[in-house]
Every structure is written in C-alpha cells, then in structure tokens.
Image (tube, rainbow, N blue to C red):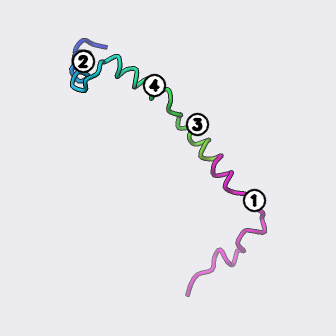
Amino acid sequence: MDDETYRRARRKAAEHDTSVSALVKRFLTEFTANESDTERLKREELALRAQVASFRASDRLSRDDVHARDA
C-alpha cells in the first residue's frame, strides 16, 4: 500500500475512533465469512428443491389449459 493511501486510512480510522488494523481485521473477517455467489446459489437451489415435496407428470396442466385465453 502506498504511503498516501495509508495516511488517509489512518485519518479515516481515527475519525471513527478505531485503527487501520481493526478495520482490516473487520474487513477480512467479513470477507472470509461471506459465502461466494456459487455457494449462495447452491444453497438457494437446495432450499427451493426442498419446497417441492413431490412432482408428477400428471400434475401438469394440459396443453389446452396452458393455451386457454380469457374471452
């Protein structure tokens, strides 16, 4: 990290009554705790699949029902 960026970070940390080290620690803790997009999507997919208790082809709408239009 360049000196100017570090100086600005120190000033900003001081404004928030903390240190650069504490900010970095918090960032890294949050960064490593968060799941990746792929992990989140897998988790959401599993949750959705769990909601579908059972599926039978006979439960589907007929072709006529799918294409029926209100007059």
Q: Which residues are magenta?
A: 46-71
Q: CA distance from mark 2 to mark 4?
A: 19 Å
Q: Residue at x 40, y 25 (%)?
A: 27
Mark 4, Cα crowd under 10 Å, few <14 / some 14-19 / many 20+, is few
Q: Which residue is mark 3?
A: 39
Q: CA distance from mark 2 to mark 1?
A: 57 Å
Q: Which residue is mark 1?
A: 54
Marks 1 and 4, the one that precedes in the sequence: 4
Q: CA distance from mark 4 to mark 3?
A: 18 Å
Q: Which residue is mark 2?
A: 10
Q: CA distance from mark 2 to mark 3?
A: 35 Å
Mark 3, Cα crowd under 10 Å, few <14 / some 14-19 / many 20+, is few
Marks 2 and 1, the one that precedes in the sequence: 2
Res 5 quadrant in image: top left
Q: What is the x, y in percent for residue 24? A: 37, 20
Which residue is nearer to you in this view: 28 or 70? 28
Find the residue positioned furthest to the top: 3
Q: Tell me the kind of residue under disc 3.
A: Glu
Q: Residue at x 75, y 59 (%)?
A: 54
Task: Look at the numbered disc 2 and give the secondary structure of its residue.
Answer: helix
Q: Are marks 2 and 1 in contact (CB under 8 Å)?
A: no
Q: Tell me the kind of residue under disc 1.
A: Ser
Mark 1, Cα crowd under 10 Å, few <14 / some 14-19 / many 20+, is few
Q: Which residue is mark 4?
A: 29
